[in-house]
Image (cartoon, rainbow, N blue to C red):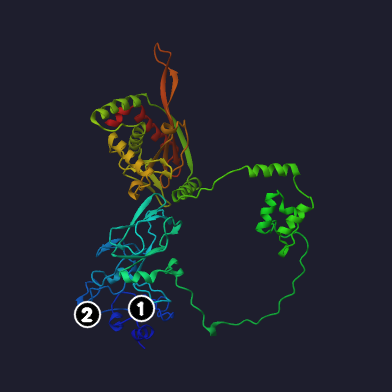
Amino acid sequence: MTFASHIIRHSKQLKNAQGLLKQDHAILVRWFSHSTRSISNKGDDVSKLHQINNFPGQNICVCKSCSGFMSSTPIFTRSYRAANPTKVQNGLAVRTEGTSVSGMVFSRGISCNNAQLGRRFSTNSGLPPHQELGMPSLSPTMTEGNIARWLKKEGDQVAPGEVLCEVETDKATVEMECMEEGYLAKIIHGDGAKEIKVGEVIAITVEDKDDIEKFKDYKPQASDAASPEAPPAPTPAKEDVVEKPISPPEPKAAKPSAAPETDRVFASPLARKLAEDHNVSLSSIKGTGPDGSIVKADIEEYLASGAKAPSAATSKADKATVSAINYSDIPHSQIRKITASRLLLSKQTIPHYYLTVDTCVDKLTKLRAELNSIQEASGGKKISINDLVIKAAALALRKVPQCNSSWTNDYIRQFHDVHINVAVQTDNGLYVPVVRDADKKGLSKISEDVKILAQKARENSLKPDDYEGGTFTVSNLGGPFGIKQFCAIINPPQAGILAVGSAERRVIPGSGAVEFKFASFMPVTLSCDHRVIDGAIGAEWLKAFKGYIENPETMLL
């Protein structure tokens, strides 16, 4: 029996299968509503298709690898795995290998070698053609996301470029756009849904409006969440199963009444809670439950016997203290979880060391006052001390490029562009938007960029381009908060971060007839990754930075 005949015998849904199964280079994957039997064995490259003669229209296939007649209407569809890097065909984004991409597959203009095609059907019901929209990966570090809100509701018509929903990623809230025309049939995860894995189905779209009602009770199959490359383990045939003779159970040796092998105390949750409330040690109680575990009755009996580890007065005082504590549990936001994991990773894997220097800022503040008077006269925005610090840090990185690098297991990558991340604290968490090419920009442009990015961060509207690709970070707690000095945690994969403290006036020795004079000093601390930046290199960078701060006119050259 030929493979085509085998297909027809198992499904009445495929018409013109004899011609369809001859098309070359495509592997057809199909789930049948009337049979759960697998058509192809594991590893088979099945359904080689060469030429389609039975479709109306008799249009020529423009596939680079095929020659034959194909229809310009969609044959099968919707989700496939690309084998080549990202490109666009017929307005359809094709991603890299292993990434599921949604979109309508047409027989015209798409190379059969570029995609492995398949159609998603329910194995238990005849659902119409539909598209499963997965949680997109909107940043390099994103593994899961939250649905902030849906801008479309079930039943709405959607078109390419329209925003479907807002997704809260690990760094910002990003709009998710529709890729093709259709109707939003089902929303799997509604507003406020949390911790949705990348690739997990969040919505269903259909082509025909009449098909919407058929997805009212739709639930994605459990197998959709699993990796498509991992087929289920085959069930062994009956003759392969060797039945072992059942041997009579061995007599169990009497368990000694001594303490168990480990120090772990087994107790029910209710017993543990009751013991904690009464400040009773579980190790001092003998359990009467299964396998010697402690149950609620054991705690009550212990308390009734009057045997209490602490005194009654102490226990009452502890209970009064506990009852007097009021608290609220605040759920972790997505950015809070990612910030926590990345900073923990940084402290655990990056060998930090810190260099601190005091910089005299008298000339810097004088130059700032002169520049701001010019800005006011021309209607521009004021320049802050932090803007001057960013400019000085960028020029120092250009002067000492070893600090403008990152560590990898095989090499140290030294960046040729200087992109400075600026730490911005908001109600939603800590953001680090990036000022690109800070060494090449003027102070007014840096000031404008920082203000725009800070506003976006507070509004939670940063795009990936606004915070990705930084090579160095500046964190300033001195100006806004008056912090004298602190040590910042490196933002991986960068190799350095500058912590800026507040300026203070000090009395210093004078020169000539003046015995003492006043001067303002601003302490800065450079956190370095010792794998990339040696101590002498870090000191050289701080020397260059201090030179720009104490002689700010050199930044204008």
Specify the amino acid type for callout 2.
Answer: Pro
Q: Callout 1: few (<14), some (14-19), or many (20+) C-alpha neighbours within 10 Å?
A: some
Quadrant the N terminus occupies: bottom left
**Residue 84 higher or lower than 540, as above or below:** below
Q: Are marks 1 and 2 in contact (CB under 8 Å)?
A: no
**Image location (x, y in percent) of residue 353:** 48, 39
**Image location (x, y in percent) of residue 486:** 47, 35
Sequence-wise, which precedes: disc 1 or disc 2? 1
Q: Nearer the viewer, residue 402 or 395?
A: 395
- What residue is disc 1 on? 46
Q: Residue furthest right?
A: 305
- What residue is disc 2 on? 56
Q: Residue furthest top?
A: 513
Query: Is residue 419 among what the camera can see?
Result: no
* For discs 1 and 2, the disc positioned in front in the rendered view: 2
**Residue 539 higher or lower than 493, as above or below:** above
Question: Dot 1 lies on which element?
Answer: loop
* Left or right of 550 in this view: 73: left
